[in-house]
Image: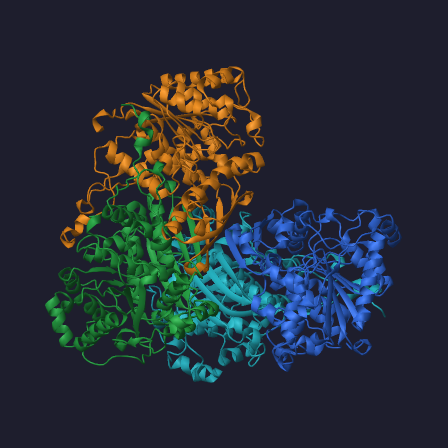
Chain colours: A blue, B cyan, C orange, D green
Amino acid sequence: MKSNIKPAEGKLGILLPGLGAVATTLIAGVEAVKKGLAEPVGSLTQMGTIRLGKRTENRRPKVKDFVPLADLNDIVWGGWDVYTDNVFESAMNAKVLDAGLLYSVKDELEKIKPMTAAFDQNYAKNLTATNVKTGTRYELAQQVMEDIQNFKEQNGLDRVVLVWCGSTEIYYEASDVHSTLDKFEAGLKADDHLIAPSMIYAYAALKLGIPFANGAPNLTVDIPALIDLAKETNTPIAGKDFKTGQTLMKTVLAPGLAARSLGVSGWFSTNILGNRDGLVLDDPDNFKTKEVSKLGVLEDIFKPEENPELYGDIFHKIRINYYPPHGDNKESWDNIDIFGWLGYKMQIKINFLCRDSILAAPIALDLALFSDFAKRAGMSGIQEWLSFYLKSPQTAPGLPAENDIFKQLIKLENTLRYLMGEDLITHLGLDYYEDLVTA
Amino acid sequence: MKSNIKPAEGKLGILLPGLGAVATTLIAGVEAVKKGLAEPVGSLTQMGTIRLGKRTENRRPKVKDFVPLADLNDIVWGGWDVYTDNVFESAMNAKVLDAGLLYSVKDELEKIKPMTAAFDQNYAKNLTATNVKTGTRYELAQQVMEDIQNFKEQNGLDRVVLVWCGSTEIYYEASDVHSTLDKFEAGLKADDHLIAPSMIYAYAALKLGIPFANGAPNLTVDIPALIDLAKETNTPIAGKDFKTGQTLMKTVLAPGLAARSLGVSGWFSTNILGNRDGLVLDDPDNFKTKEVSKLGVLEDIFKPEENPELYGDIFHKIRINYYPPHGDNKESWDNIDIFGWLGYKMQIKINFLCRDSILAAPIALDLALFSDFAKRAGMSGIQEWLSFYLKSPQTAPGLPAENDIFKQLIKLENTLRYLMGEDLITHLGLDYYEDLVTA
Amino acid sequence: MKSNIKPAEGKLGILLPGLGAVATTLIAGVEAVKKGLAEPVGSLTQMGTIRLGKRTENRRPKVKDFVPLADLNDIVWGGWDVYTDNVFESAMNAKVLDAGLLYSVKDELEKIKPMTAAFDQNYAKNLTATNVKTGTRYELAQQVMEDIQNFKEQNGLDRVVLVWCGSTEIYYEASDVHSTLDKFEAGLKADDHLIAPSMIYAYAALKLGIPFANGAPNLTVDIPALIDLAKETNTPIAGKDFKTGQTLMKTVLAPGLAARSLGVSGWFSTNILGNRDGLVLDDPDNFKTKEVSKLGVLEDIFKPEENPELYGDIFHKIRINYYPPHGDNKESWDNIDIFGWLGYKMQIKINFLCRDSILAAPIALDLALFSDFAKRAGMSGIQEWLSFYLKSPQTAPGLPAENDIFKQLIKLENTLRYLMGEDLITHLGLDYYEDLVTA
Amino acid sequence: MKSNIKPAEGKLGILLPGLGAVATTLIAGVEAVKKGLAEPVGSLTQMGTIRLGKRTENRRPKVKDFVPLADLNDIVWGGWDVYTDNVFESAMNAKVLDAGLLYSVKDELEKIKPMTAAFDQNYAKNLTATNVKTGTRYELAQQVMEDIQNFKEQNGLDRVVLVWCGSTEIYYEASDVHSTLDKFEAGLKADDHLIAPSMIYAYAALKLGIPFANGAPNLTVDIPALIDLAKETNTPIAGKDFKTGQTLMKTVLAPGLAARSLGVSGWFSTNILGNRDGLVLDDPDNFKTKEVSKLGVLEDIFKPEENPELYGDIFHKIRINYYPPHGDNKESWDNIDIFGWLGYKMQIKINFLCRDSILAAPIALDLALFSDFAKRAGMSGIQEWLSFYLKSPQTAPGLPAENDIFKQLIKLENTLRYLMGEDLITHLGLDYYEDLVTA
């Protein structure tokens, strides 16, 4: 397997639809890292290690030293946005990173100007777009493909990936126009309003064989039409919704409770945040998309239908509140009502003073680098091994998702071990005690 | 393998040194469960399920239906204590369970009277013992062996296990007298005060080939002398320290942070509790034993020497406060200072309103049942696969412990699968997408 | 003044429109107190003390020993409800008090059966009423007056008071029909739907010269028509909304911040509760009434128009969430963003695990006893000195409310001192140091 | 009274023993305020308003516009320290204020160099002093007086005040040498080690008729010898211990619980902080001084001897933990176990993410300005009206302290009103409803 993986030669273009808080934090951060001004903390590809072989072998290389990933110095940035601000201006507005840091990479950021966006006001009513393409959906898709091709040529790139960093679109479900590639392409031509703007980007990328990862909870590539297209053009896809903040904590904590067979009767989650994402989610239609993505994780982890005595009656409620005093400093508070031995009640309260984009940026980076790696490794279609990064992982039709972050991590790590020809790890480890086992 | 496991026929005696809050909550609980009055929530053996085969096979039996464990109806209880209260009286004093529940199993509990304890005041200064054996350590060990034999005969038992449910002993390290079985036995005869009371019980059990699990942080069976004895008599051992409350949360949360390569600069943990355990731990010598057990978990999970940028500077502090208003309702508060992308700081606060004995009782049950199972499966010596239940897991000499509860769970589950002839699970799962992978 | 206060002779009837969680907790509690089974904690009239004279005099009688209040043994209970459950049944449903306690006063509670209620479904859509009067609003008012008269005669009562313990009505503002007594009475006859059910009870009470206190946030007696009627019949009135839980904490904490001139940029308040009150407030129309009542307190305490640098930009948001797992155990979480010296930011988080009806019941008791006392002391109209108990205090037209609970307490205490002929307390206290002051 | 207050003409010297985090935050802050760079938030004298007359008069001047206080522009700074760092260097080390702000007032801060300190290592073992005076205690006192006189002359000052901003000294109680001025002066000459260093400064100041306020919990001016000296030289004194952080919250919240007659069974308080104060308090002898100061407040507010049913059994525990990751960002966590109606239990958890010096600096400023004002108003000896600012207020012998911050505030405000010839406020306010009261 290992010998078939193409090396990460040449430059990698990372194109981001949506140059807001997350995207600019990602770009500014990587540029700062390249200058040695900061560390890419939170990025498994850059900072993480992976155990290889037996515990006693003490082999724990960094992931980036184990797997042939693109080097940060080979990345070239680009993107689209509904506003005309360049990346420096947008980063200053976002107020995620200190002005001092941003000024230290000002030249690099100012150069990156957003291409005009493919947009439909109906999908994000709270935004006032000023930098948008015109035309039917089909024409928009053609324009995005041209954007990509131009970007690749002008920058002398070897490869390109797309990561959706735009706002959450309003809630919609898959319908007939999404069911086959033919119908989807007909829909583009008919400018069918059921095709969301994010799908236009995804279609354009996949058509060109360019990997696409989706950081928002909208369906986007999670429709049969685009899954088929990904297979057809041998292109990896991944989605949906960067797993940050509260849901990250949930997929850490819930497996811990389930491991111990502790019951759960209620889980109340509230969030306060004041960035643009908070503004968009203040619209109930957009919130619904996010809510569906966030609600699902507990059900998968607890499997109430299989453990009705423990999880059959969970009351799970999620609130997101637009609260300007906190800006991007998203804060969550969870109250979890659990019960133990003989049904005795206990409570867990978690207050997470997090920073939304600080948690999301390294995820976007890893998804970009791993998607590019997957393409070079000859993998295509849904990359479930990247579900580690996602709130609402896309899986094969009919296959239940794994939301337990620890199972997701083993899946990711064992996938890397498998591709690189290393033994899979099962944590059995009886051999350490071999002489202790009665033969 | 599976065919060599002896069936769980006949009665199983569970003997508990220390009939305080944990032990009485365990006994009363199992008796209530047997009467259909409550559920054994928190017990993996009774309530937990285990996935077998592919995700798509939907095989998820209960653990107790998959592995041949002793039935709750076949358990007979006994124990030793430094007080003369019978189990009903002791449970009423502990105030963990409602009086209503305790009265419903009063007859069963009153029958269980503590045997006189092997005790040394120096190991728990805050206790005023009234029900103790006399003699040298060697004589005490002989008396405990007689107690066990009598208990077995009088109750017509097939098998017996011991689980230490006594208080935390004062801090001590392994010394010369613990280094070999010969020296240990000489020490018993010389009444060497470096041999802790808990070791006397462990020695007695192992000498008789009876499994011993240690729910407190004192060394006890974690010394070469007794590890050797365990091998010699083909007896499983496990320790140390039931993993409940704050440390449980720590070994859930820390792996989550490490998974995401998030840095940690400080972790402050405080506890308030008002039960007898809190009283004993109010003595600095006893607290030190607990502190050492609790402090170690982060080091193992974060591996600061391998990840100095992320975990090289953790300031980790643990406090336990005796606070009578809360009784057994132990409450913990943690402040965790983390940092992410580019070093930006975030904080997590966790407030766990837990119940100490409610969390510990099912662990004691599972350790008893699994230790008995291990014995029947022909396993002996250190049972690292039971580290899932323990704050400070005993491992093979030189082998670093795994404190990540999720790795511990996989280890436990894959051990069961292995013993029962099922495929180990690696979570690779690429075959679900087989047609998607370019050959 | 003191000599003009009529003594508390004979029996006092307390009539409660709304026999739900609060009312039944009040009634059961007082009955338990009368039997010596529990203490009336949280009641200033029963447990509180009041300082009289100089600090050095050490005069601190209980309030009930200082002021001539009705004795608990002289209280007779009655009420109306939209359900037919008697008080025992209703208390069992409410699940606020332990069944054991309720059974100990079962006889007393079962006797109290709700009279049919004056109700209008439009004012509380989430309730399904089964025990209601029929007729125009005018007829309903006549029926309520008859109910009161019958209750008084049948029980041989000397005096009666009414305390509204019903659900929060939907949001409405005062309109023309509420502006004068004539228009109001014409509206009753015309069955004007702008007259809320709670006003019918208030009108009936005041017409008979019976004091009326309002424990919910709906206007009720806070309209010119009924204020005039109260004056006309020399009857005390008080409202609105029992000050419990989160708002209680707010009116404690906000004055502390204001005292120290600490700035506030945001205050986010969320609540989770699962009782009938939570169900009613799940309807946005009813929630709005509560929200208006809760939002006002900060504005009054911080006076942003006078302190714009400190409080001009407060973002204040309140959420109430129906969360069945908690039942009556209302829990609140507040995040308060403050700033100090030079604008440096700090945060306060408050998590209050309270019990809604446990906090409300003693307030209802005190309002009943003090209203009766006020009537005997010859006071009439708005009793602002009772604002201590109320979230949204009713004041003289044009007079801004005082929401600072400590100013409210001084007002209450100095009012009692004034009525009883004691010196008012100013806390000046320079005389303790008289010889220290340069003459 | 008002006409006898001398105006605040000329310059005011503020001398601070201890130029650490609090003092440098104060000095840098005032200098920044003078340049219009920031606001003196948290200072009642600068930002606070005071109500005068009836509520309807709408008279609410700023305190500084009502009372003749020294203008910030007339302040000249000086101080002593055991380290030689100038104020800029010390402020940079303290890491309380941003470097950007400190650089903007660098010139002003660099000029302020610490005079050599009167120090005794036994009173603060964790400090390594490098800038200390030599001589007997009597000689040290003479040297401090010379320092003060020189400072006054060199800067052309009209008046001077001293505010102790040094570390907490080890615990000591008043003994014979502190009992009279004669014995005290004899002790100075005999270099009696029972005279603490802080007392040397206090003695020197009072001898010169210079007001002294004590921001730490050590006794200092709270001994008969120095109280007598203060009277003799007509000098105001105030102490002890700036009321910041957790105790501030406690004296806000406890009066709220007491007001409502809610019972309290336990109050657990823990703190984490990493500044020099935290380091000093890591020594148990110094912590004891702080503990005594912090423990007292609840007793006074709840008066358990007068309210045994409510407060007779409070278990009150305070912990301070040195936790370097937080620096000056002190964080407290409180768990309060309360009970209400019929004894039903509730809990309050408060998590205060505060900044120690940010809260303390404006208190030091106000104490300096009000002490100077008191001197000009002819007041001398203990200034109990300043207890608003203090954890452990000094009162007349035998007079119990008032720790309720709201009573302290009324005392402060009514003292100002009294001195300025305004009506005292009692919050009675029945006259607003005059026509409503039956004549």
Q: Is residue D336 positioned above or below D190 on the image?
A: above
Q: Kindly identify the residue that appears in the image at 64 percent across and 62 percent down.
A: A89
> Relative to C132, does residue D42 appear above or below in the rendering?
below
Query: Residue D258: horizontal and vertical position, in percent?
Result: 33, 46
* Residue B86, position as x, y percentages in the image: 40, 56
Q: Position of residue C140 (x, y in %)?
A: 49, 18
Q: Is residue A428 visible?
A: no
Marker count (numbered): 0
Please identify the quarter of the rendering in which residue A392 is found. Answer: bottom right
* Residue D330 against residue C177 in the figure, above or below: below
Horizontal side of B232 relative to D280 (left or right) equals: right
Q: Judge by depth and name the residue closer to the eye, D172 or B147.
A: D172
**Residue appearing at x 64%, y 68% in the figure:** A28
Closer to the camera, D389 or B174? D389
Within the image, what quadrant is residue B3 found in? bottom right
Quadrant in the rendering for residue C44: top left
Can I make out residue C84 in this image?
A: yes
Identity of the residue drawn at 85% across and 69% down: B438
Q: Indicate left or right for C111 with A80 as reference.
A: left
The image quadrant where one finds the N terminus of chain C is top left
Q: Position of residue A56 (x, y in %)?
A: 62, 81
- Seen in the picture, residue D156 relative to C276 is either above or below; the reply is below
Residue drawn at the location 16% of the way across and 59% of the way down: D234
Question: Relative to D346, is A119 on the left or the right?
Answer: right
Residue extending furthest toward the left: D182
